[in-house]
């Protein structure tokens, strides 16, 4: 679309990624809205007219040069005098923000008359109900609404920003064509979720898959629970069965036995997930639980990973997970999850999605000599010689009696090997967070190198 008479839009300029760079509006809302993006299409700055600016730096959002909010998975943090105020969002199953609230007086209770920032209710395609929604604030921070996306109200545009495309809830249509339109010949390239917003939600198109290793505490609790080991004689649901959860792809962080596990670090914490997400500019993550038996072997976990790869491909094909044009898949595996991740990568490289796979990252891989990284995609291994879980076996190799045995070796087929001689703490450098500083330095180096080029 290059113009819209209904909203007085006379011209829209686009860049090579088909993202709008300048929108010109005439009439009552006369003015321009301009955008600056990074090389991968990440929005960095919005300017309305010649004055008002909004800048986006990862989770940090600035308005006219002043920090406005720091986003996190449950809402956002906003400056409050010399301190900070945590503001929370309640969302429904479609990701729509329904309620925004904060404990402004810090009394441990939410006062419905004064501490509800915004109440929002929607029609299926995203228009808000009118006449009864309560609003006590209309700041920038409350603009994340339908599907959790940012509403651009500047100059009366009222478009939702989905990253690769903009969406008009009044029409139920995209403002840009679907880059995958050739897959859906019976649908208009501007159609939103195949005209079925109740059963489908359009993601932002970027994908990093995180595969965790053994959740030792949770696995031990399961195995030692007498209800479980007695119940196995009655029902299979009591059985410790890695295959039952290995092919579940979750969008809500790592889950095990109905518990949510903070394995990769919460969004905004500066943890492993933040560092990798920021490096790739990809913030759409899914999680696979690679927890297996304590003495499991790499070939078995690799085989389970291939099954998870089949499930990922199926979800890509049926639209549950959607990739936009030119966007790629990265898979990160830690400890036991490394062989699992290699299995997923192998399955993807044998599929129609092979050209969309960008990298496999193996952190503290367990039994690294027991699996192979597939050809045709970058593979990076990070190991520590003092790692007493996966490299050295601990004192006199005692750990190998309990973990199936593992020693340091290179992953066959991997392109990059980073060896750390020793690390104090974190099981001798095994734990995922022990890699954060090194991953950050590598990311900074690569980004600086790109800037110089």
Image (tube, grey):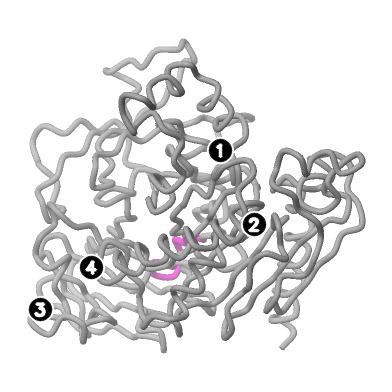
Q: Position of residue 410 (x, y in %)?
A: 77, 70
Residue 370 relative to residue 64: left or right: right
* Residue at which label 3 appears: 187
SS at badge 4:
helix
* Dot in front, 1 or 2: 1
* Residue at which label 2 appears: 275
The reply to whether callout 4 and callout 2 are in contact (CB within 8 Å) is no
The reply to whether callout 3 and callout 4 are in contact (CB within 8 Å) is no
From mark 1 to mark 4, how far is it between C-alphas?
Answer: 29 Å
SS at badge 3:
loop
**Among the two numbered marks 3 and 2 on one chain, the one whose residue lies closer to the N terminus:** 3
Residue at the spot 28% in from the left edge and 48% down from the top edge:
145
Residue at the spot 66% in from the left edge and 52% down from the top edge:
335
* Residue at which label 4 appears: 318
* Residue at which label 1 appears: 262
**Among the two numbered marks 1 and 4 on one chain, the one whose residue lies closer to the N terminus:** 1
Asked if the stretch drawn in magenta spans residue 52, the answer is yes
Q: Which residues are magenta?
A: 47-55
């Amino acid at each position: 679309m290059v113009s819209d008479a209904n909203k007085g839009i006379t011209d829209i300029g686009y860049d090579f990624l088909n993202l709008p760079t300048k929108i010109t509006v005439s009439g009552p809302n006369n003015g321009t809205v301009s955008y600056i993006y990074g090389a991968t299409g990440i929005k960095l700055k919005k300017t309305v007219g010649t004055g008002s600016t909004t800048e986006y730096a990862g989770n940090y959002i600035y308005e006219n040069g002043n920090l406005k909010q720091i986003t996190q998975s449950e809402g956002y943090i906003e400056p409050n005098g010399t301190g900070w105020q945590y503001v929370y969002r309640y969302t429904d199953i479609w990701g729509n923000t329904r309620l925004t609230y904060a404990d402004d007086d810090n009394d441990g209770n939410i006062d419905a008359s004064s501490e509800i920032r915004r109440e929002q209710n929607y029609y299926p395609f995203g228009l808000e109900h009118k006449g009864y929604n309560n609003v006590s604030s209309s700041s920038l921070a409350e603009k994340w609404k339908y599907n959790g996306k940012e509403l651009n109200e500047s100059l009366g545009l009222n478009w939702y920003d989905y990253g690769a495309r903009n969406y008009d809830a009044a029409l139920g249509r995209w403002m840009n064509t679907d880059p995958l339109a050739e897959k859906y010949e019976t649908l208009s390239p501007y159609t939103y979720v195949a005209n079925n917003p109740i059963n489908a939600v359009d993601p932002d198109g970027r994908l990093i898959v995180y595969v965790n290793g053994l959740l030792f505490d949770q696995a031990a609790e399961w195995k030692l629970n007498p209800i479980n080991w007695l119940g196995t004689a009655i029902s299979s649901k009591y059985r410790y069965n890695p295959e039952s959860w290995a092919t579940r792809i979750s969008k809500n962080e790592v889950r095990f036995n109905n518990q949510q596990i903070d394995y990769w670090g919460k969004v905004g914490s500066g943890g492993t997930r933040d560092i990798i997400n920021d490096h790739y500019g990809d913030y759409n993550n899914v999680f696979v639980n690679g927890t297996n038996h304590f003495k499991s072997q790499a070939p078995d976990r690799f085989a389970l990973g291939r099954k998870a790869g089949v499930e990922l491909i199926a979800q890509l094909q049926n639209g549950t997970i959607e990739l936009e044009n030119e966007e790629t898949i990265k898979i990160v595996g830690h400890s036991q999850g490394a062989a699992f991740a290699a299995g997923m990568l192998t399955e993807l490289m044998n599929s129609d999605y092979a050209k969309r796979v960008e990298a496999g990252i193996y952190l503290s891989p367990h039994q690294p000599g027991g699996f192979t990284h597939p050809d045709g995609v970058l593979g990076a291994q990070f190991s520590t010689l003092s790692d007493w879980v996966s490299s050295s076996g601990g004192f006199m190799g005692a750990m190998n009696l309990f973990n199936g045995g593992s020693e340091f070796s290179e992953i066959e087929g991997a392109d990059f090997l980073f060896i750390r001689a020793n690390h104090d703490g974190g099981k001798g450098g095994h734990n995922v967070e022990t890699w954060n500083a090194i991953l950050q330095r590598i990311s900074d180096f690569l980004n600086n190198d790109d800037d110089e080029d």
